[in-house]
Image (tube, helix red, strand yellow):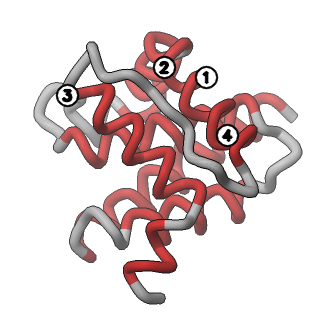
Amino acid sequence: MSSEDLKKKPRVIIVQILYAKNFNSEFEIKFPKHRFKKFIKDVVLGSLERKELIEETISLHLNKDIDIKRTEKLLMILLHAAIFELLYKPQTSVNIIINEYLNAAEAFVDSKQKKFLNALLDKISKKIRNSNE
């Protein structure tokens, strides 16, 4: 997939906005015209509003696998957005969520980090979705 195609992907846009907000709390969030604007807005605002709950979920299920303080910010942002979807977008299948964030990750991280993200998402999705179903 070309980098131009990747930039138009909703989850890539989500990660870009969350990244900007993470590094500059004064950053004014603007949502681009997009076919999936409502979805992008829901995930971005939901991830920000439920940041503490998402971090609790990470601590609860991934504390042996990941050190929140030492893990690269970009990886944490990908994880936050994906966990938000796993928790609050039950109509979207786990496989779609994981695949979409792994595809988005291609724009930001190397293959080793992508494999690590895959392992984390696989583990946490089983905990979140199985306990809620």
Closer to the camera in the image, 31 or 41: 31
Answer with mark 2 or mark 3, whichever residue precedes in sequence: 3
CA gap between label 3 and label 1 equals 18 Å
Residue at which label 4 appears: 86
> Label 3 is placed on what type of residue?
Phe
The image shows residue 51, relative to residue 10, as above or below, that is: above
Q: Residues within 10 Å of mark 1 (few under 14, many from 20)?
A: some
Q: Quadrant of residue 93?
A: bottom right
CA gap between label 1 and label 2 equals 5 Å
**Residue found 51% across the figure and 59% down from its top:** 101
The numbered dot on residue 48 is 2
**Residue found 26% across the figure and 46% down from its top:** 74
Q: Quadrant of residue 52?
A: top left
> Label 1 is placed on what type of residue?
Gly
Closer to the camera in the image, 126 or 8: 8
> Label 2 is placed on what type of residue?
Leu
